[in-house]
Image (cartoon, coloured by chain):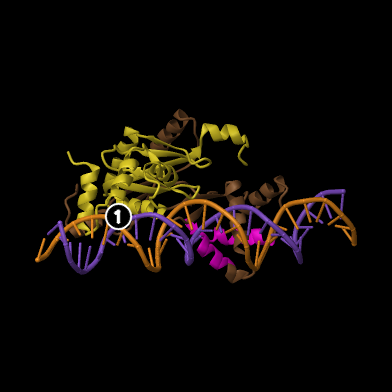
Chain colours: A brown, B yellow, C orange, D purple
Amino acid sequence: MINEFDLFKDFLHQQKLRWTPQRKMILDIFLSFDGHVQIESLYEKIRVQDPSIGIATLYRTLKLLVDCELVEAHSFQNGKKTYERMFHVRHHDHLICTSCGKTIEFEHPLIEKYQVEICEAYGFTLKSHKMELLGICNNCRMKNNNPPFL
Amino acid sequence: MINEFDLFKDFLHQQKLRWTPQRKMILDIFLSFDGHVQIESLYEKIRVQDPSIGIATLYRTLKLLVDCELVEAHSFQNGKKTYERMFHVRHHDHLICTSCGKTIEFEHPLIEKYQVEICEAYGFTLKSHKMELLGICNNCRMKNNNPPFL
DNA sequence: TCTATATTGATAACAGTTATCAATATCAAC
DNA sequence: GTTGATATTGATAACTGTTATCAATATAGA
């Protein structure tokens, strides 16, 4: 079964770029994270293994990983980017309790279908999506003694 | 009917902050835009009316407008924030081009319906949601003309 | 092994945003 | 209206995350 390393190697070869120990290590450590990874955490963990690696190499490698679609970049409010693994991972959306922070992952095939339709209508090629439903979970509603709809 | 100016004035008063001509003008010009406003465009238009206004005042005022929930801040791929009017505006979701940053607003009643169903299934009381479809717009696809790897 | 050239780490540069500060404006109390 | 405590302003320095530059080095095909 094809894996991320082979895919990255192929991509580099195809672009006449080179497979280096730094690139291997960065991908390796990136894959050891789950969910959204911040440059900062990634860089810390990388430096444990090899303190000589420069931050520029990390940014450059992440950009390559995004180019070959193994990784997706997100921007959040605080101005920092996060990076998310995009290969061998099933897509899902999030239900988030704004009171306790609990999150539930879910999928909904029909919603996905409508998303594609919307993109087609506007001439977009859909690459990914993010959907977050924000609400109050059962637990918190009981605890706070709030009525079910508020 | 209550309007943005009264709401902002009340908010400032409540926080023991002051109602100034600069704040009035910034809100006024902000409201003359539609959709997602970039600081840059906003600042240009403001300086036409009063070239003495400083960029810091613009940032400070936008932060206040976000605090009082008249405005919502978004961060997109290119690292720039955009600001969106949040009052007297119907809820909508976003289609975002990850290449040029162009955004299109849309609504889809069926998707909204399924969101409610999902929340009910997990015992959540839905408060709000955010859905972003990320892709490549027609323009950028033509311009770049580079097929994705894989 | 040799050689063209891609890659590296250090760091300067850059862009967007925020903090600092002295001068000024606001507004509640009188 | 005047006063005075203090919030606000504009200019700009500082800060943060990211990217570009560059000389030294590593890679990989011949």
Q: Tell me if A81 is positioned left or right of A22 in this view.
A: left
Q: Tell me if A43 is positioned left or right of B130 in this view.
A: right
Residue shown at 18% from the left, 41% from the top: B2
Q: Nearer the viewer, residue A134 or B124?
A: A134
Q: Nearer the viewer, residue B18 or A9?
A: B18
Q: Tell me if A42 is positioned left or right of B109 in this view.
A: right
Q: In which image quadrant can residue C2 be found?
A: bottom right
Position in image of residue B9 (x %, y %):
22, 50
Amino acid at the residue labelled 1? Thr
Is C21 located above or below residue A78 in the figure? Answer: below
Q: Look at the image and give the residue range highlighted in magenta.
A: A21-46
Where's the C terminus of chain B, which quadrant?
top right
- Give SS at disc 1: loop
Crowd rating for badge 1 (residues with CA inside 10 Å; few <14, some 14–19, many 20+): some
Position in image of residue B32 (x %, y %):
33, 37
Total numbered circles: 1
Dominant secondary structure of the magenta stretch? Answer: helix
Residue A57 in magenta stretch: no
Residue A29 in magenta stretch: yes
Where's the N terminus of chain B, which quadrant?
top left
To which chain does the residue with label 1 belong? A
Q: Which residue is mark 1?
A: A98
Position in image of residue B78 (x %, y %):
50, 47
Is B111 located above or below residue A146 in the figure? Answer: above
Position in image of residue D7 (x %, y %):
26, 60
Q: In which image quadrant can residue B46 be found?
A: top left
Residue shown at 35% from the left, 43% from the top: B84
Q: Nearer the viewer, residue A150 or C12?
A: C12
Is A80 located above or below residue A10 in the figure? Answer: below
Residue shown at 24% from the left, 52% from the top: B19
